[in-house]
Amino acid sequence: MNVLSSIPSLPNTFICGDFNARLGDLTGDALVSPRGAAMARWLADRSLTVLNGPLAHGIPTWVGFRDDREMSSIIDMFLTNASLLSPRLDIAFDLSLGSDHRLLTLSFSFAQSSASESSSVTSDATLHPRRLWNLSRLGEPDPCQLYQDTFRSSSAPLLSQLKRLVQHPPSSRPPIDDLNASLNNIIYRSLDSSVGDRPPRPSHWKKYWTQQLQDAADFRNRCYRRWRRAFGID
């Protein structure tokens, strides 16, 4: 819950993942776990909607076996405070993912006016291009040492600030987002000065996913579906 509480509340926020929390009737699960009760209060405070409830009520996202019995729960969820048009949440049953968790896919339309309003409210919603660095050069002694030295000197003020916060905790929550941004900028500057950045790969770059890999994945899923639907095979 500490991680969830640290997430800033912004317009058109989407949060998804394995929350390991069971919310009972809110999602159609069989019970409310202690973590789920705490999460329900956090959801109400943030005015967030659990999309599993209206779009996939009662459909398990985790299925496992214990003492030869099938167990299930709804712990993988999509949360949002956005207004969605024609939302759809699909939960895959027949994919062999090597996990007890099922694949969730959310699709929806988004009103252009909502996106414009959110971008005008805060600059945090602005999308930035992905930055890339020549990280392989960190395996070389000189660039690696330069990165360490630059990071050490650049992070000294931030380290002092963090020590003061630990030794003398303030009455109100410190600016977590600002501290995180400062750390990221220090890392970026250290990488720039030691190994240098590089442009992203062009759109025509050859993808690793070949037809042979696709055929193998399709065959695996076919076998998995046959196993799931079979009787008397453990």
Image (cartoon, grey):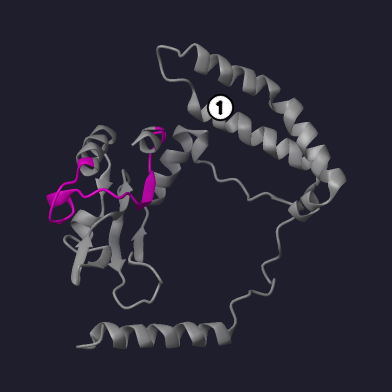
Q: Is residue 120 visible?
A: yes
Answer left or right for 51 relative to 168. left
Residue at (75, 42) in percent of width and height: 191
Residue 39 lies, in percent from the top left, at 25, 40
Displayed quadrant of residue 146: top right
Seen from the viewer's position, the closer of residues 170 and 182 is 170
SS for tag 1? helix
- Magenta span contains residue 20: yes
Residue at (55, 83) in percent of width and height: 213
Seen from the viewer's position, the closer of residues 212 and 141 is 141
Seen from the viewer's position, the closer of residues 9 and 214 is 214
**Quadrant of the frame with the N terminus:** top left
Displayed quadrant of residue 200: bottom right
Displayed quadrant of residue 178: top right
In this rendering, the count of numbered labels is 1
Q: What residue did someone put label 1 on? A: 179
User: Vertical placement of 155 versus 143: above or below?
Assistant: above
Structural crowding at the residue carrying mark 1, measured as other residues with C-alpha within 10 Å and reported as few (<14), some (14–19) or many (≥20): some
Q: Residue furthest front?
A: 67
Answer left or right for 83 relative to 210. left
Q: Is residue 193 visible?
A: no
Residue at (76, 36) in percent of width and height: 148
Magenta stretch? 6-34
What type of secondary structure mainly makes up the magenta span?
loop
